[in-house]
Image (cartoon, rainbow, N blue to C red):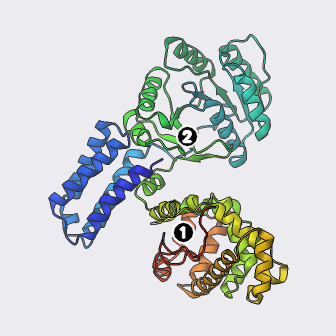
Amino acid sequence: MFENLSERLSGVFDRLTKQGALSEDDVKTALREVRVALLEADVSLPVARDFVKSVQDKATGQSVTKSVTPGQQVVKIVHDTLIDVLRGEGEPGALKIDNAPAPILMVGLQGGGKTTTTAKLAKRLKERDGKKVLMASLDVNRPAAMEQLQILGRQIGVDTLPIVKGENPVQIAKRAKTQAALGGYDVYMLDTAGRLSIDEELMEQVKAVRDVANPRETLLVVDGLTGQDAVHTAQNFDDRIGITGVVLTRMDGDGRGGAALSMRAVTGKPIKFVGLGEKMDALETFEPERIAGRILGMGDIVALVEKAQQTIEAEQAERMMRRFQKGQFNMNDLKMQLEQMVKMGGMEGMMSMMPGMGKMSKQMNDAGMDDKVLSRQIALINSMTKKERANPAILQASRKKRIAKGSGLEVSELNKLLKMQRQMADMMKKMGKMGKGGMLKQAMKGMLGGKSGGSPEEMLQGMDPKAMEAAARQMGGKLPGLGGGLPSGLSGFGKKK
């Protein structure tokens, strides 16, 4: 969603950081471009103006002009200012649900994704926080709205209030409150009706429900693709009902992302969660530091580690670590890595979170590469015998022909895969020896931290930044198996078929 803004800003900063010394005019010119980039990304004018003014005040001071790397200093100031604009009060994603049964009221316009978000949040509360949750649909207007929530409830294993036809929203809210108290639920979620636009009837209905339920949290669900209109909706709801936080949906879409930047500044209400797709687990806490990092192309390593923790099995990773330290890396290991990449959102998903790799993922797309490449490589490995996978060195011409034929691919693609395996094995050897305690060992410990109670941030603190930089230099900004630079000479991967 923040792709265009990210590209524009990284272009501005590339020019700044290449210069040795910065004059006030350089900073002003750069900030003019930053302002245009923000406005193009649909950030509201007052917010963009305040943002640029705030950066300008800090960026034209002594600390920048006398800094060793003035360009980098300006980027840091912009980064910090972005975080200030995005940050709300309290912990991101924290909900006030202490005294059971705690009511959560979900409000918003029609088509914003309220019902789906209610189910996603219920699943999150059940699985992450161990809460017993009851969901109730108060939408008596939209056909099959109640049935939709019931079906979602069955999918995620969360109870829904039985449907009684002919009741009005206030009666349903009262019944949900009673059932939640009698059934020993920690949280009950009320999914209210939406309208196409804000009208008096909708507001009165939501107000009546609010007065009956007295919710601990009132979350406004807004479609992130509606841009500035989302900000007006949030203001209206806050003035009339009083909201405690915002959930932005469709943040995986190709909207301009400005709503997220304006929302917090204009309404003063924190964005608590963002919806990133249709799946029931596609809901993330809105972390200002990470979003700012993604916007400025600094990647989001913490999110990458979190994703890895969710998909890597602890024992499997321990086994892998021991092998890698010895410099052993055969086709079984490569297959495991490729399958891991698919689980973690494919190449593009991973690259967007790696510092400095954002541009590379665009080059890969332009070069005609996508995640089908991964499945083709897995198919090649599946066509090998156990012995061949364990020891790829034994593959001579006749075996290669058989493997290529078995996977329906060319021998040339198999050769590229073998080259990639050799490069990765070499790199693993180097990384196993590098840095204090071995960079690889630290990285793998980080991936396993979730199983032993460490947070991703704590794990990353243990990793030696100098060792990471050295590894990046050794790789020369390339990924193993991708031959030279991108996009020419992509040795590890074939073109799209």
Identify the mark nearer the N-term, 1 or 2. Answer: 2
Query: Which residue corresponds to the image point at 47% horizontal and 33% vertical from the top-left?
Result: 226
Per the rendering, the mark at residue 460 is 1
Q: Position of residue 11 (x, y in %)?
A: 33, 59
Question: Viewed as shown, does residue 435 lie left or right of 183?
Answer: left
* Residue 367 in view (yes/no): yes
The amino acid beneath tag 2 is Arg
Q: Is residue 8 above or below residue 383?
A: above
- Label 2: element kind: loop
* Residue 391 in view (yes/no): no
Quadrant in the picture for residue 113: top right
The amino acid beneath tag 1 is Leu
Q: Position of residue 114 (x, y in %)?
A: 61, 31
Per the rendering, the mark at residue 250 is 2
Closest to the observer: 143 or 94?
A: 143
Closest to the observer: 371 or 39?
A: 371
User: Whole-Å distance between the Cαs marked 1 and 2?
Assistant: 29 Å
Question: Viewed as shown, does residue 144 lie left or right of 37?
Answer: right
Query: Which residue corresponds to the image point at 15% horizontal and 63% vertical from the top-left?
Result: 23
Quadrant in the picture for residue 261: top left
Label 2 environment density (alpha carbons within 10 Å; few <14, some 14–19, many ≥20): many
Closest to the observer: 184 or 50?
A: 50
Q: Is residue 186 above or below residue 30?
A: above
Q: Is residue 53 above or below residue 480?
A: above
Question: Viewed as shown, does residue 293 lie left or right of 156?
Answer: left
- Label 1: element kind: helix
Query: Which residue corresponds to the image point at 32% horizontal and 64% vertical from the top-left?
Result: 14
Label 1 environment density (alpha carbons within 10 Å; few <14, some 14–19, many ≥20): some
Whether tag 1 and tag 2 are in contact, CB under 8 A, the answer is no
